Image (cartoon, grey):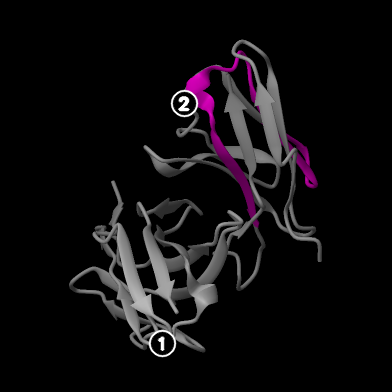
Amino acid sequence: AQTVTQSQPEMSVQEAETVTLSCTYDTSESDYYLFWYKQPPSRQMILVIRQEAYKQQNATENRFSVNFQKAAKSFSLKISDSQLGDAAMYFCAYRRGGNKLVFGAGTILRVKS
Amino acid sequence: DAGVIQSPRHEVTEMGQEVTLRCKPISGHNSLFWYRQTMMRGLELLIYFNNNVPIDDSGMPEDRFSAKMPNASFSTLKIQPSEPRDSAVYFCASSPVGPLYNEQFFGPGTRLTVL
């Protein structure tokens, strides 16, 4: 069974600084997708960034980027120039064929002003 | 685009009552998912549909839970009878065909409290 592990229950970052959230996953598949979702206090799940496993280049979306290490089964999220609006719960998720998403337990990110 | 619509946003009911949660996916999306979020178990997939057909319901906790998708624009998740341990946030999500088919768009969730 596929599992997704987020080992950091909570992280803090100073406004304008950079923070990295960790995620590891377990799979025997070679073709799959990885995602980071953000859940602010409003509860709305918002897609932050995604990575296709067959792509070697790390995905980036403005201030958000990933470090995808396929051999190590690691998929960390880096947030640069952190803003107060980045404070939320962040979920790492794995998906292969069949459309099922498996989520990690989440990391609470606090941003200090 | 209105996004995925869920109703009600909050539901408080008493143990033993029937609860029906509703979802309207984004127009044109052909996959629909029901998730449950709790502190203890995190986000769990309950069931998903492709083209209105249930594909995988292995996450449905027990027979008290049932889900239907009578057409492409509407789905329900029913709990009968409800129990306090069913208290959770229930999310509906949909995904499209084509290049973005692997991205799921979530609704705002329904917070269910069973007393």
Residue highlighted by disc 1: A80
- Mark 1 falls on what kind of element? loop
Residue B72 is situated, as x and y percent measured from the top left of the image, at 78, 46
Residue at point 45%, 79% (across, down):
A113
The rendered magenta stretch, by its main secondary structure, is classed as strand
Side of A82 where B16 appears, left or right? right
Side of A56 where B64 appears, left or right? right
- Mark 2 neighbour density, 10 Å: few (under 14) some (14–19) many (20 or more): few
What range of the chain is rendered magenta?
Answer: B68-94
The verdict on residue B72 being magenta is yes
Query: Based on the displayed image, in which of its 4 quarters is residue B29 positioned?
Result: bottom right
Q: Residue furthest top?
A: B16
Is A80 in front, or is A55?
A80
The verdict on residue B10 being magenta is no
Q: Is residue A111 above or below residue B96?
A: below
Residue highlighted by disc 2: B61
